Amino acid sequence: MSQKSNLNQTITSVDCTANPAPLGLLGFGLTTVLLNLHNAGFFALDSMIMGMGIFYGGIAQIIAGIMEWKKGNTFGTTAFTSYGLFWLSLIGLLVMPKLGWAETSTSIAMGAYFFMWGLFTAVMFYGTLKINRRLQFVFASLAILFFLLAVRDWTGNTTIALITGWEGIICGFSAIYAALAHVLEELYSKS
């Protein structure tokens, strides 16, 4: 191979795509805050939360996951596509019974749903121990949130429901913080 071919190959293999993590974290964080403002009793579950769940929590995170795949980031791909599909499945669980497509899930079934997401998130938290403290906090607080949601659904305890809402708000804002820190650090490192 000539030197020119080697140089061209090196240039074309440089990844010049943007970091998709802020998009995924913002899709997760904003949607999580809004849903948990509902869980904390500030407003009803309505089309605003459903729309955020489908488009920003769901689709935007899936797009971020696909972008992470292109970058070769297995953790980011798994996290963003999984949580994007979590939002879409949650909206499906709420909407399908209203459309007559399925029976409403029992509180025991919903508890199992949230518990499984908690287990998944706990394992993903372990992966963040090799990344940074911001993501460690996001994933730890998310695992706690899922387990609290499971206990809320299994017990019907209103105090746990209120605590869950506030914990979810903290979790969502931690993801927003992590996302904006990524954006600003990258922006100011280029100046």
Image (cartoon, helix red, strand yellow):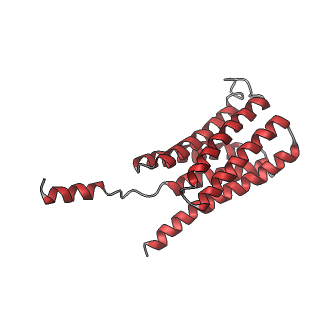
Q: How many marks?
A: 0
For the C terminus, which image quadrant? bottom left
Q: With 21 as the anchor, is 57 left or right in this view?
A: right
The reply to whether residue 56 is in sight is yes
Which sits in the foreground, 71 or 172? 71
Residue 99: x, y in percent? 68, 27
Q: Is residue 79 shown above or below 155?
A: below
Q: With 60 as the anchor, is 31 left or right in this view?
A: right
Residue 78: x, y in percent? 52, 43
Which sits in the foreground, 78 or 132? 132
Q: Residue sitting at 68 percent across and 42 percent down?
A: 118
Rendered image quadrant of residue 2: bottom left
The reply to whether residue 40 is in sight is no
For the view shown, which residue lies furthest in the bottom direction?
A: 191
Q: Residue sitting at 54 percent across and 57 percent down?
A: 131
Q: Is residue 168 shown above or below 93?
A: below
Rendered image quadrant of residue 103: top right
Which sits in the foreground, 39 or 163? 163
For the view shown, which residue lies furthest in the left direction?
A: 2
Q: Residue sitting at 48 percent across and 54 percent down?
A: 20
Residue 122: x, y in percent? 64, 45
Residue 3: x, y in percent? 14, 60
